[in-house]
Amino acid sequence: MDIHEYQAREIFRRAGIPVPPGEVASTSAEVRQIADGLGGAVVVKAQVHAGGRGKAGGVKLAKSPAEAGSHAAEILGMRIKGLTVERVLVTPAEDIVSEAYLGVLIDRANHAPLFIASRAGGIDIEEVARKTPEKVRRLHVDPRYGLLPHQAYWIADFLYDDPSHIQQGARIVGQLWRAFREAGASMAEINPLIVTPRGEVKAIDAKVSIDDNELFRKPDIAKYRDTSSEPAAERQAREAGLSYVKLDGDVGCCVNGAGLAMATMDLVHHYGAEPANFLDIGGSSNPDKVVTALQIITSDPSVKVILFNIFGGITRCDDVANGIVEATRRIQIDIPIVIRLTGTNEQLALRILEDAGFTAYTSMDEVVKEAVGLTRAA
Ligand code: GDP
Ligand code: MN
């Protein structure tokens, strides 16, 4: 789950990281008022779940409350990476001597959290890492022991020369580690981590992604969810207990079980097409879930054919068959549906589908070939 900068700043503050104050507003008049209260120059920052807001014109410095108001009028309603800006953060403008990058994320390949630090902050860290890897320091944290003090110093020492900056930096590395752990984050980053003319090290941007599997035990974090920033299909899927990920292909896949869903996507690719989505309808499927799944798949205009692949274990094939029949009664579907069902109550399911005019398959290979063929014909 992605959260907004102002929410990530709250998490950082709770962990002790120095973060300038700020307030969120949704109108230009409010922004003027907040800027007035902060007294002096401010930054107006779009709050959307997208990086690179600065480049897109979503971060603007203002010298006066009036200027802050007019910047807000421009930023509010702006679209950044397909998302509409509904709120802005207003925060005092800081004078900047240097901008560094400091982040920690889960490195799945190495089964450990990974700190990444660079003096070349403020800009695209992926590009820095690619073009000038020597400008990036990486450190894996052994999850058994957590971050050790000397490791925090080793990172801060890479970022700064001045002992005071190193000391402040090392403290922030430790605090970022705590913030990352306490929030159940999969990623937490400060970009930029600045040094001010007075020699203070502080975070003026905050980005945190939360591991969805942590949310059930972190109610304070779960309430940060902003459903207006989520794609409608993903919200609908989550609320119905389905796991759905939109992809770029045109074969809409509806499968039970994550493993079978992945295997189905691989087979679609193998026969020369690409899946439009990952969708796992879960272990026990009631007809309503199938209806929702079909609504979600058909709301994607790039889907040319719908492919069901059901392995009946706990899931009963007849439940899925009834769901498909009911869904096609409730919603108009103008594209072909191909179905493979095997396992529990398979015979019953095949009969239900045939009575309703569908052709059902029991072979996964055949049904995927058929789906790919229909995609080409469409
Ligand atoms: P992002 O583009 O979404 O990562 O937004 P950031 O908050 O990182 O802002 C982008 C850039 O705007 C920063 O790298 C800074 O160069 C600049 N910026 C942001 N806040 C301030 C500020 O308070 N003072 C100054 N001088 N520049 C700022
Ligand atoms: Mn940034």
Image: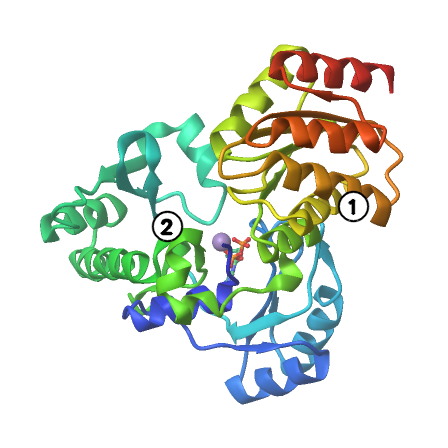
Q: Tell me if residue 357 comes above or below residue 123 in the rendering.
A: above
Q: Which image quarter: residue 94?
A: bottom left
Q: Which residue is labeled 2 in the image?
A: 100
Q: Tell me if residue 233 comes above or below residue 130 in the rendering.
A: below
Q: Which is nearer the N-term, disc 2 or disc 1?
A: 2
Look at label 1 and name its amino acid: Glu
Q: Residue at x 88, y 43 (%)?
A: 332
Q: What element carries label 2?
A: strand
The quarter in which the C terminus is drawn is top right
Q: Tell me if residue 315 comes above or below residue 308 in the rendering.
A: below
Q: Which image quarter: residue 195?
A: bottom left
User: Would residue 95 be visible to someone looking at this image?
Assistant: no
For mark 2, does the 10 Å Cα neighbourhood hold few (<14), some (14 to 19), or many (20 or more) residues?
many
For mark 1, does the 10 Å Cα neighbourhood hold few (<14), some (14 to 19), or many (20 or more) residues?
some
Q: Which residue is labeled 1 in the image?
A: 326
Q: Nearer the viewer, residue 4 or 333?
A: 333
Could you tell whether 208 is left or right of 83 in the image?
left
